[in-house]
Amino acid sequence: MNDQDRRDPERASGDAVPLASPNGASPLAALQGLSIDFSADTGAVPLANAIGPMTLIDTAPITGSPESQFGPRGERTVSKLIILGSGPAGLTAAIYAARAYLDPIVLAGSAPGGQLMITSDVENYPGFPEGIQGPELMAKFREQAERFGAQIEDVDVDRVDFSSRPFQLWARGTEYRAEAVIVATGASALWLGLESEARLRGRGVSACATCDGFFFRDKQIAVVGGGDTALEEALFLTRFASHVNLLHRREQLRGSRIMQDRVLANPKITLHTNTVVEEVLGDAKVEGLRVRNTATGAERVMASDGLFVAIGYRPNTEAFADWLDVDEKGYLVVHDETASKIEGVFIAGDVHDHRYRQAVTAAGDGCKAAIDAERWLESQGVTEVRTAAAW
Ligand SMILES: Cc1cc2nc3c(=O)[nH]c(=O)nc-3n(C[C@H](O)[C@H](O)[C@H](O)COP(=O)(O)OP(=O)(O)OC[C@H]3O[C@@H](n4cnc5c(N)ncnc54)[C@H](O)[C@@H]3O)c2cc1C
């Protein structure tokens, strides 16, 4: 169905506002009640024909006094749905929720765009046969969410109260309220903390073999870590690399016996125990590593075209871990696809998924969470918009 066919004619009748301001800033502060310029729309189909039986309701804020429904810059602070996070999961949820007229507020976090902002080429996201730069892809996600009216605030949520509805959330001293919440705060790769590592991220330094291994065909690369993730990454990378040096700071690997056996039996992998990276060498791309033997203190330069840091991920759950179930690794636990243990709080993306960890799976999760949230809001009588089955 054509996106623009779904629009509510009443909502489109206000003063037109550019969809994106020239400086890239969100026009939403100016929009207040939402007004989108559909002047470029030439293919209108009568709404009833396009979407069949559907009840559109008003989109006025749901609770609270008028004074408390706007933040210091006039932005909305009350919505039917608040989405936490602006990676692929959060922004996909925002696109779906905005198109279902839930007027979502996205509290995007202090890393707007999420993990893909720190990578260069993304070659496995469908729809971009030539590949696309991570930041460019995330800018498109955001533009698409804003086009349908999502309000996006680049703030971290510090604290939540999920004890009763509307749920309360606080970010930089502003209180937000919503009948439903989608948590899509992702996970952060753990890094070694070297200046040279940060400088060469996306230029040969990566934390995702599935994502970036393909760029290292017939190259020599190094993997740092000693747990199962590092062993898996090293084995996976042998498909592409001419050779993989596995660097572990301790005497013994930490991974499971079976994975260790596979690594040690693989002729394309050399294990270097008691070895730490002191510096990633190169200006525009990785050209080698300065490594140190922790037992002898001896330093040397190791030839390497790439470095994969596989020392773990930290799910971003500080603000709500006390309210929701977490597993032994600290990831949120989902019940029945996207639900959490609290009715009305949904979960999407890498914040719960440590198995797939891909942009496309996170985006799929965001879609599912938005549909589940909408259906739940409908079941609570908060919204009557019946679009979930007719996306
Ligand atoms: C180096 C690297 C390269 C990668 N390359 C690829 C690739 O080529 N292809 C691919 O498919 N995948 C790739 N991935 C994996 C992919 O980036 C992730 O799977 C995906 O970004 C997960 O999306 P997400 O929305 O769940 O979380 P994230 O992308 O992690 O986004 C989380 C969001 O939550 C926000 N947030 C965190 N805490 C809070 C808070 N308290 N309040 C509000 N917001 C908060 C953050 O600011 C961020 O916006 C790569 C990952 C890395 C690290």
Image: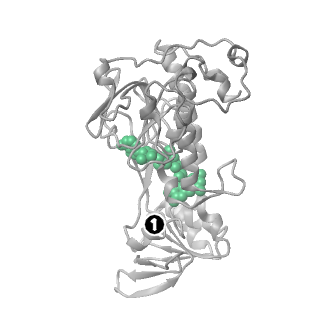
At label 1, which amino acid type do we have?
Gly
Q: Can the viewer see residue 366?
A: no
Q: Residues within 10 Å of mark 1 (few under 14, many from 20)?
A: many
**Residue drawn at point x = 48 percent, y = 48 percent:** 23
Which residue is painted at 47% across and 12% down in the image?
A: 381
Q: Secondary structure at mark 1?
A: loop
Q: Nearer the viewer, residue 91 or 329?
A: 91
In this rendered view, identify the residue nearer to me: 77 or 128.
Answer: 77
Residue 53 is left or right of residue 65, and the answer is: right
Furthest residue toward front: 15
- Say if disc 1 is inside 8 Å of ligand 1: no
Please tell me in which quadrant of the rendered image residue 88 appears: top right
- Which residue was labeled with disc 1? 226
Image quadrant containing the N terminus: top right
Residue at the image position 43 percent from the left and 82 percent from the top = 290
Residue 292 makes an appearance in the image: yes
Q: Position of residue 262 (x, y in %)?
A: 59, 67
- Side (left or right) of 287 relative to 248: right
Expressed as whole percent of the image width and height from the top left, the position of residue 63 reads: 35, 17
Image height check: is 9 above or below 186?
above
Tell me residue 257's x, y (percent).
51, 63
| Quarter of the picture holding the C terminus | top right
Write down the quadrant of residue 361 in the picture: top right
Q: Residue furthest left?
A: 173
The colour style of the image is: one colour
Relative to 301, say whether 83 is above or below.
Answer: above
Q: Please identify the quarter of the rendering in which residue 259 is found.
A: bottom right
- The total of numbered circles placed on residues is 1
Expressed as whole percent of the image width and height from the top left, the position of residue 17 reads: 52, 32
Q: 296 or 323, which is in the foreground?
A: 323
